[in-house]
Amino acid sequence: MNNISSNLLQIKSRLPESVQLVAVSKFHPAEAIQEAYDAGQRIFGESRQQEIEAKHTQLPRDIEWHFIGHLQTNKVKSILPYIHTIESVDSLKLLREIEKQAGLLSVKVDCFLEVHIAREPEKYGFSMDECREFVATKEWEGYQGVIIAGVMGMATYTDDKEQIHQEFRSLRNFFQELKASFFVGENSFRHVSMGMSSDYGIAIEEGSTLVRIGTSIFGEREY
Ligand SMILES: *Cc1c(COP(=O)(O)O)cnc(C)c1O
């Protein structure tokens, strides 16, 4: 038996006040989310459009939903009315579609640029150079719906703690670089989303502002 509320409270007690918790509820039922909600959690992360679609209608309205998986452009429109943050913006095509649809719906949505930091080959996300190039165009300054609110990254899945430290440090440094070069005085550019169940302690040491934790709260996922 998982005791979701005690897992949650235990993790929260270890987080510095400056770090927000996204409870990653993918593949867990709405009842599990409700239990975490009743224990005070308000930010939840999901990675599939159909799943989040179903869950958000069943659950309290004041939940802050974060999308953390690969998002297809044709799914953007349907999630925008209730989504708070898309943490996994992994292409310009996707970002521009979010901007277009958010404009049509007159909504604002926080977006994080997903950045490659792991040594493993990754299917999705920007290289740091691609991010630099895009941010330098200042295209985003004209956006009406999209708020560029930070960066997100995942470390290599490894036992080598020093490697994980280095990868998270590289993301934090990259955030600082973008902040200093392009987002000075832009308070909305504020998040470094890094750290999952296995590595969030390291991520916090390296300056994470937002951790995404699933298994340690809800137990193993059954796919
Ligand atoms: C599933 C997932 C998590 C949560 O992983 P856990 O190991 O269960 O804590 C965090 N971030 C992303 C992007 C995920 O897809």
Image: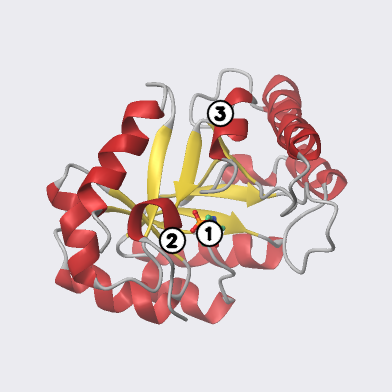
Q: Position of residue 127 (x, y in %)?
A: 82, 51
Q: How many marks?
A: 3
Q: Secondary structure at mark 3?
A: helix
| Front disc: 3 or 1 | 3
- State the mark number for residue 99: 1
Given residues 59 and 156, the one toward you in this image is 156
Q: Earlier in the sequence, mark 3 or mark 2?
A: 2
* Disc marking residue 13: none
| Spatial CA span between label 3 and label 1 | 31 Å
* In the depicted structure, whether residue 185 falls above or below residue 19: above
Label 3 or label 1, whichever comes before in sequence order: 1
Q: Is residue 220 left or right of residue 134?
A: left
Q: Residues within 10 Å of mark 1 (few under 14, many from 20)?
A: many
Q: Is residue 83 above or below residue 159?
A: below
- Residue type of the residue flagged with mark 3: Ile
Q: Amino acid at mark 1?
A: Glu
Q: Position of residue 111 (x, y in %)?
A: 53, 49
**Residue type pointed to by label 2:** Ala
Q: Quadrant of residue 94?
A: bottom right
Q: Image check: 19 left or right of 184? A: left
Residue 41 horizontal side relative to residue 198, left or right: left
Q: Which quadrant would the N terminus be assigned to in this image?
A: bottom left
Whether residues under marks 2 and 1 lie with C-beta atoms below 8 angstroms apart, the answer is yes
Spot the residue most to the front.
Answer: 1
Point out residue 82 in the picture as x, y percentages from the top left corner: 30, 62
Element type at marker 1? Answer: helix
Could you say which disc has been placed on residue 102 in the image? Answer: 2
Which residue matches tag 3? Answer: 204
Q: CA distance from mark 3 to mark 2?
A: 32 Å
Mark 2 neighbour density, 10 Å: few (under 14) some (14–19) many (20 or more) = many
